[in-house]
Amino acid sequence: MIRPSVLLFALLMSAPAVYRYVVDELDLSQVLIRFLIAVPIAAVLLAGLRFVTAGYGRTEEQGTSANSTPAEPEAGSAP
């Protein structure tokens, strides 16, 4: 299923064609073809953006790094 963000980005990419349709410079079929071409391009671009930014904000917690065993007294010191 296509994400709404892809459709919105494709609409923004084809916005000049929509504007030219509003001012009667293009046919509706040409506007729809440009939108349909923009959908897979927008999907690829947004998938690449999601891939690049997927690791940001994640923190891997692997437990404590401090030594949890008590320190041993030195050999020459008195207890």
Image: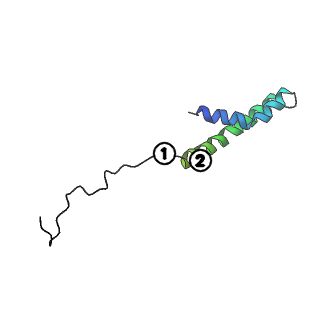
**For numbered disc 1, what is the local secondary structure?**
loop
In the picture of the structure, the residue carrying the numbered disc 1 is 57
Mark 2 vs mark 1: give the one in front: 1
Nearer to us in this view, 26 or 46? 46
Q: Position of residue 19 (x, y in %)?
A: 81, 30
Q: Residue at x 83, y 26 (%)?
A: 22
Q: Residue at x 54, y 47 (%)?
A: 53
10 Å neighbourhood of mark 2: few (<14), some, or many (≥20)? few
Q: CA distance from mark 2 to mark 1?
A: 17 Å
User: Quadrant location of residue 43?
Assistant: top right
Badge count: 2
Locate the N terminus and report the quarter of the image it occupies: top right
In the picture of the structure, the residue carrying the numbered disc 2 is 48
Q: What amino acid is labelled 1 in the image?
A: Gly
Q: Residue furthest bottom?
A: 76
Above-or-below relation of 15 to 76? above
